[in-house]
Amino acid sequence: MTNIGFIGLGNMGGPMAANLVKAGHRVTGFDLSAASCEAARANGVAIAADAPAAVADAQVVVTMLPAGKHVTSVFAEILPAMQAGALVIDCSTIDVDSARKAHALAAEKGCLSLDAPVSGGVGGAQGATLTFMAGGAAEAFAKAEPILLQMGRKAVHCGEAGAGQAAKICNNMILGISMIGVAEAFVLAEKLGLSHQALFDVASTSSGQCWSLTTYCPVPGPVPTSPANNEYKPGFAAELMVKDLALAQEASQANGATTPLGEHARAIYERFAQSGNDGVDFSGIVRYLREGRD
């Protein structure tokens, strides 16, 4: 059993913390939302009065927060309360520069650190099927991997500090672009009188095959577990896709990369989210395209 502190008990962090409890760890958590704290408490997480109290006796600390400014602020708050030599794992999706600043703060305290954003959405958090993309020292990854694999099914060490965030934004740029392509194909197929199932049966076994089609199909029917069969409830909300695509574009501009499809996908998803769909699953972009809104 490991004493684990967990900061950020929302839609992703709450189920992740619950899975650590199921794995036999003693988990103490904190979140600014009282409702999130109560939900986590119901799943066996001990709730602390504040973030420093949640980490005081922890050998491992996990954070799951909205943005880079929150991560660096929380690190500055909790590290003075942590034991030297403890491991802190940030699972938020943030910009690479903020991730590296968080690593530097941890190093000043003498703590091991890992940036380990996730792929898999709320369903993956609940089912412990997440993929972790990790950046940091090999020693930190070796210590973190058993913990990560109790919250997910795969953990990849991508390189040094910030490499996990780099992998995440590149992966999600692919995801955003591919989902628009798949959705456009289904909209065209509808116009041509082709059934959803017919297009799926062809594309899923030929050159059009991709995760956005075979696992997360944006139309009802072919993949029963996709959000399309549940009124596009997330899943992975459109506002989160906008965030990730914006991070990819910031990184592209800062590093001189040419990513025109990534920029176009960001603009399309931004318009989709701003039209009242920010809380809709990102695969709902098919409805927006069907209406000829872009």
Image: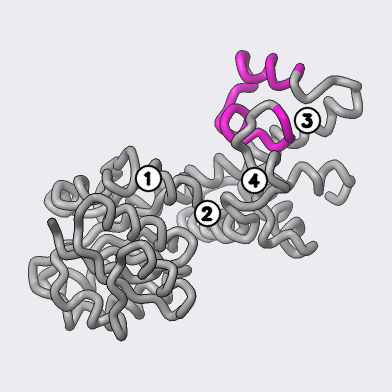
Which marked residue is nearer to the observer: mark 4 or mark 2?
A: 2
Please report whichever mark, 3 or 1, sits nearer to the chain's N-terminal start.
Answer: 1
Question: If the image is split into quadrants, where does the N terminus sit?
Answer: bottom left
Please report whichever mark, 2 or 1, sits nearer to the chain's N-terminal start.
Answer: 1
Q: Mark 4 points at which residue?
A: 260
Circle 1: is it few (<14), some (14-19), or many (20+) Cα within 10 Å? many
Looking at the rendered structure, the secondary structure element under dot 4 is helix
Q: Is residue 18 left or right of residue 146?
A: right
Circle 3: is it few (<14), some (14-19), or many (20+) Cα within 10 Å? many
Q: Which residue is drawn at 27% across and 46% down?
A: 150
Residue 248, numbered circle: 2
Q: Position of residue 163 (x, y in %)?
A: 33, 51
Label 3 close to label 2 by CB (< 8 Å):
no
Q: Which amino acid does label 3 sit on?
A: Phe
Rendered position, 66 above or below 159: below
Q: Which amino acid does label 1 sit on?
A: Ala
Closer to the camera, 220 or 66? 220
Label 4 to label 2: alpha-carbon separation: 11 Å
Q: Name the residue under label 1.
A: 128
Please report whichever mark, 3 or 2, sits nearer to the chain's N-terminal start.
Answer: 3
Q: Name the residue under label 3.
A: 186
Q: Residue at x 57, y 50 (%)?
A: 235
Q: Position of residue 258 (x, y in %)?
A: 56, 46
Q: Residue at x 63, y 29 (%)?
A: 223
